[in-house]
Structure formats: structure tokens, C-alpha cells
Image (spheres, helix red, strand yellow):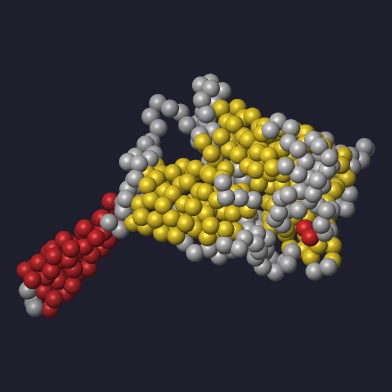
Amino acid sequence: MIRVLCLAAVLVLALAAPAAAHTVTAGTDLRIAQTIAGAEVTVVVKGTTRVPGPLRIGVIAYQPVSGLPIGLEVRSVEDGRTVTGTAQAAANPQYTQLQVERTGPHELKLSAGNETAVIPFRVLVERDSAGAFLIYGGLFVAAVLLVGGLLTGATARPGRAMALAAGAAAGVTVAAMVIVFESQVPAPPPDGAAPAPAPTTSTAEGRPYVQARMETVPAQPEAGEEFTLRVDLVDGSTGRPVDDLTAHHEALAHVVVTSEDGRYFRHVHPLRTAPGHLEVRLSAGRPGRYLAHAELERENSGGQLVAADFTVGGPAKASAESGTVTESGKTGAPATQAGTTVTPRLQPAVPIAGRPTTIDLDTPAGVRTWLGMTGHLLIRGQDGRFFGHVHEMGAPGSRVRFTFSFPEPGRYLAWVQYATADRIVTVPFTVNVTAPEAK
Ligand SMILES: [Cu+2]
């Protein structure tokens, strides 16, 4: 009887062991916002649980695109193996499956229209920890031995029953010890992770800020003509391109381009065309001075803000650019919902420099998360020297609320942005901030 039980335990453990070693947990989705072919989209690469296996890639559209096809190409950096497919950008996209053969560094190439982006990423698969195996193994052995002990005790052989009970206690002890101490043991790095930095490298020091330059091509765009805004990132000490931007708020860089008077506003997400090079195509209908602010974050460094200005020449033309992020004041669409103009409510009504102001805006039903947040508030000083960005972090509801402390008295231009089922709504407004009362 005992022999049968023990054999059963060994068999089950032997069968269970290989399965447990292949048990992997799902990784995290990669989400990258991109402005491509004039459309604002977010590319999602679903976390995977097994490699070789299919990688699921979808493109979420945040404005009406009737079947914008996006070419997909996934390439393993280590062996050069490439798989291709197509995704249709949509509000609720279908996911395209591309087979990957290994973990580690990969590149995702996106193409739409005549634009191409290359996004580096890593395919990671969690390794099962030895601790989990010990916990489940220990509990399993204990359970088998306890049952064996009870059966043996029932057949009146107390000595053997005691021995089995002692074994069960040992199994429970092992499992309990592991449960208690596992949290203090570092988990193994996932399969495909970047090699850990050398122990001599102090991560506390961090990396220096990127040397960033923003410019337009051509240097002076013509009104109504498409131009490219380029962001070039260089490491100050080596002079080499910087290619270690982290995806913060679901983008490699957030770029806001505004005309000096604030009537033109674009919040876009440039494409990474090559290491250290980001590009986005724009057009502006009116001549004049424009400001560009880019928010980016280098790995193990910190967030930084890069500013530039440029001049659009020529006579005014109707902007060739389509899309729903329209110039404020030109069409009433962004600030109008169901025929009523929506104005944010400020508390206090006249903000005081250096003190928090709350800004409330009613939103329609069906607001959805965009760039990881329910709402975005972008604020620019009249002269462009100040640029700020805050979020509504609560769940989508009937309003968005922001708290912001304007740094100094003066006039500010501000834009609230949120995404509905089929578009990104931009609500522009201006704020006059007073000085704190002298006492
Ligand atoms: Cu952004």
C-alpha cells in the first residue's frame, strides 16, 4: 500500500516537474503613441507568455481613420529573423499575430503612407522561480504523505503512520519557510532581459541629460506646406546618438507645437526613424513664429524638456492638414460639444501665482484613456518660456479635474485634451494669473 502511494507521488512529481518549469507569467504590454500618416495612434504589443510563439500587435486609432493600414515588421536583433504583417488602425483594433522564435532584443518597424518608424523593444518571458516549485512541491509531498499516514494509521501500523506524518510536517515546513523568505530573494531576470550592469556601475549616479536639438526641415517652412520637425539626441560625452529613451506616458517623446498666439496647437508623438532621431510631419496654415516643446526621458536619467522656435513664412493658406485636432478658433469643433461652448471652471476664478488652482471641465460620456491618462492639461506662458503639463489621473467620468500652480503672474495659454470614442478633443482657454497680495 505504502509502496503504491509512494510510487504515485514520484510519478506525479516527475510528470508535474517539467510542466512547472515551463509555466510562465504574462509580461507587460508595450504601448507607444505615434503620429503617423497624419493620424494619432497607439501601437500595442501584447505581453507574451511563451516563446517561440505569436506576438499580438494592434494599432489603436484616436481619430476617425477608415481602415488605415499599418505595415508591421518584427525583426530579432540577435539573429536577424524577420516576420511581416499588416494591422488596421481602429478604435478597437484586431490584433495581428506575428510569430517570434526567441526572446531578447527586437525591432518593430511600422510603415504607413510614406512614413516609417522603427521601435526597439525586448521580448521577455518570465522564468518560473525556484521558490514556487519548492512551495507547491513541499505542499504536494505533505498532502500525499498525510493521506498515506491516515491510511496506514487506519490499517493499524502506527510506527509507519508516524514516519509519514513526520515527512508531511517536513514538507509543510519547507513550503512555509519558502513562503516566508521568498519575498527577500530576488526573482530571476526574465528570459530575454538585457544583461545586468556591471556591479561596479553605480546606478545611483544615473545618466546625464541628453543633448537635444530640435529643428524644422526646411529651416523655414512655408504656410500650408508640409514640413518635418526633427529631434536629434546626442550623448554629450561621446557625441554619439542617444537611443535609450524610455516610453513615458506611452511615447518616446511628447511634442507640443503652438503658434505664438496659441491659435495653432498640435500634440504629437514623433517617429523614431533611426537611433537618436525622431521625426514628425506637420503643416501650419498661417505664417509667423511657432514654438515647439518636447518632453522626453532617458533611461536611468529623468524627464527633460527641450524647447525650440521656428518661423513659418509665406502668405496664409488653409492648412492642408486634416484631422480633428484643429486650430482653435478656426472651427468651433474642439471647444464645442452638442452646440454649447464648454469652458473650464477655475477655482479660484483668478488664479494666484504660486498657489494651487483647480481646473474642472465637463466631459461627455465615453471618454477613454489616452497616453495612460483620462485627461491632459498643457500650459504655456504667453512668451513661450514656460511650459507645463499635468494630468487627470482618475478614471474616466463626467468631468476632468486638474490642480496646477502657475509659477508667476501673467497670461497663460492652456489646452485640455481628452479622447472620446472617435477623436481627441482639445479645449483651448487662456488664464490670467495675479500676484499674491502684498501684506
Ligand atoms: Cu503626448
Q: Where is residue 136 in the image (x, y as percent from the top left)?
A: 27, 61
The residue drawn where x is 17% and y is 66% is 12
Q: Position of residue 325 (x, y in %)?
A: 72, 54
Is any atom of residue 388 visible in this view? no
Front one among 382 and 437 = 382
The residue drawn where x is 53% and y is 63% is 93
Tell me if 400 is positioned left or right of 186 in this view.
Answer: right
Q: Where is residue 20 in the image (x, y as percent from the top left)?
A: 26, 59
Q: In which quarter of the image is residue 347?
A: bottom right
Relative to residue 275, is residue 39 depicted above or below?
below
Relative to residue 198, is residue 167 depicted above or below?
below
The residue drawn where x is 69% and y is 33% is 218
Front one among 172 and 243 = 243
Q: In which quarter of the image is residue 160?
A: bottom left
Is any atom of residue 391 visible in this view? yes
Relative to residue 397, is residue 384 depicted above or below?
above
Tell me if 91 is positioned left or right of 332 in this view.
Answer: left
